[in-house]
Image (cartoon, grey):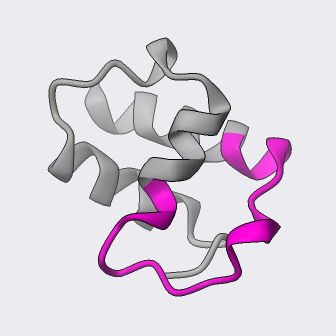
Amino acid sequence: MKWSETHRIAEALYDQFPDIDPLSLRFTDLHNLIVDLAEFDDDHARGGEKVLEAIQAAWIEEAK
């Protein structure tokens, strides 16, 4: 899984952490959750704020 796969990452986060409210996470915590996903295999340093915002928004949509 790569940083560009925002919806796939959001789905994995929702599946693995259904009780977490994505709006309650700091971006540093969100980043750590993402890079710890078993399927994630991209450069950890590439997850900037814009990418994290997109993943957070997709996770919010997934949780609806």
Q: Residue 1 in the image: x percent, y percent?
A: 48, 82
Q: Of 3 and 57, which appears nearest the observer? A: 3
Magenta span contains residue 51: yes
Q: Is residue 58 left or right of residue 20?
A: right
- Residue 38 position in % (x across, y down): 30, 77
Identify the residue at image location x=78%, y=68%. Answer: 45
Horizontal relation, residue 38 to residue 23: left or right: left
Q: Say how many tags the image has.
A: 0
48 in relation to 3, above or below: above
Position of residue 19 relative to residue 17, above or below, is above
Q: Name the residue located 33 percent from the left edge and 39 percent from the top edge.
A: 62
Who is closer to the viewer here, 12 or 28?
A: 28
Looking at the image, is 64 positioned above or below residue 35? Answer: above
Task: Please state the horizontal and vertical placement of residue 28, each as a whole percent of the image.
Answer: 64, 37
Instruction: Classify residue 21 as left or right of residue 43.
Output: left
Spot the residue most to the bottom: 41
Q: Quadrant of residue 9?
A: bottom left
Which quarter of the figure has residue 2?
Answer: bottom right
Q: Residue at x 43, y 25 (%)?
A: 22
Give the quarter of the figure containing the C terminus: top left
Does residue 48 show up magenta in the picture? yes
- Magenta segment: 34-52
Residue under the image location 65 percent in, 32 percent down: 27
